[in-house]
Each structure stands twice: as C-alpha cells, then as structure tokens.
Image (tube, rainbow, N blue to C red):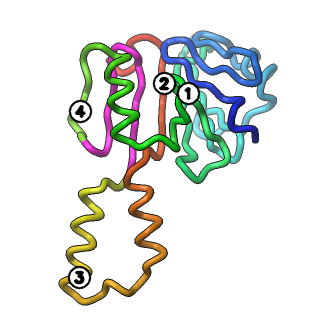
Amino acid sequence: MDNKTCVLIPLTGLEWNGQTIRFGDSREAVEQILGEAEVVRGSHYYFNKELRFDFDDNGGMKFIECLGGMDGGLQPELCGVPAFQTDAEELLELLKGENDGDIDDSEAEYEYRLLNISVGLYREITPADMDGMLLEMSNMDLTNMGDIRIEEETRRAHHWDTIGIGAKDYYA
C-alpha cells in the first residue's frame, strides 16, 4: 500500500489515489473506489481491517477509522502530516489548532474527540504508563528483561493507535 495515497480530510472524508470518498456517499460509491469490503457487524473493512467505514440508517457514509497505528500497512495523512508517524502530542496540538473549540478530553492521554472537526484519537498506552511500568520493573530488578518489547511499547506510547473522522457533529 502506498503511504501517500490515503488522506483523511476532516468533515469531508477520505482521498484515495486522487479520488474522494465523501461523508454521505453510498456503500456502492465507496466500493467503486476501494472495491468490495469485508463486512463485520455492520462496519465495512478494507486492507486487513486497517480501514473501517460506518454508514447511517439511510446508507450514507458517516465515519472513517484508520486502525493500523504506526506499524500498520495503511499510513494516512491528516492535516498535512503522516498521522501515525507524528508524535501523539504534536498531532494533538495541530488538530487543536484546526478544531478551534470544544474538545472531549474525558479520557485524556488515551482518547480525545475534537468536536468541531469530528476527529477522534485513541491509544492504549501513554508515556506515563510506560514510566510507571519501567519504575515498577526497576524496583523488581527486571530492567534487563524484554528490552526489545520495552522499546517497542515506549515507541507506541508516543503515537496514536487509531484515528477516526466523522461527518459534522459525529462526536456531538
């Protein structure tokens, strides 16, 4: 998958290889661009379940979620930056500027919903989680165990695992 072909456009949809899939488009319109989806519990998945679409009761596309994270095959661009490769705090600050208003930060550090631009960010582990884990391991003299795994988790903690964008007022 070409990393430059997927662009998430808040309040609009997704650009794929120069074609735009817009919020409100039908399942058929999405399939004309991306092909047949794998449907699981009403959600339409593409690219090994790294890209998900949800549709409203009228059949219009209302939500797009990229699920691959920084190691996934799908590496979307968002607001001019590689979304999963950009530091989590840096991307959040960029999106706060684009949002210019209300943010649901009730799950701060793990999840944010930027309400004016209908963008959601999520990660399972944060830098603070890693600091606590490393301190606990140090107290138990386990610091030499699993260095590669620790490096990987620390790197993951600084990036978003999933990014969702919705139609206007999706997160309202």
Residue 46 circle label: none
Among numbered discs 2 and 3, the one appearing first in the sequence: 3
Region in magenta: 109-123
Q: Residues within 10 Å of mark 3 (few under 14, many from 20)?
A: few
User: What residue sits 21% from the left and 77% below the top?
Assistant: 136
Residue at image mark 2: 165
Give the image quarter of residue 108.
top left
Q: Nearer the viewer, mark 4 or mark 1?
A: 4
Q: Nearer the viewer, mark 3 or mark 4?
A: 3
Q: Which amino acid lies under the numbered mark 3 shown in the image of this protein?
A: Ser
Residue at image mark 3: 138
Give the tally of numbered discs. 4
- The kind of secondary structure element at disc 3 is helix
Q: Quadrant of the N terminus?
A: top right
Q: CA distance from mark 2 to mark 3?
A: 40 Å
Give the image quarter of residue 156.
bottom left
Tell me residue 59's x, y (percent): 62, 14
Tell me residue 152's x, y (percent): 47, 65
Q: CA distance from mark 4 to mark 1?
A: 20 Å
Tell me residue 159's x, y (percent): 43, 47
The reply to whether the C-beta atoms of the residues labelled 2 and 1 are less than 8 Å apart is yes
Residue 71 falls left or right of residue 119: right
Residue at image mark 4: 105
Q: Which amino acid lies under the numbered mark 1 shown in the image of this protein?
A: Ile
Residue 129 falls left or right of residue 71: left
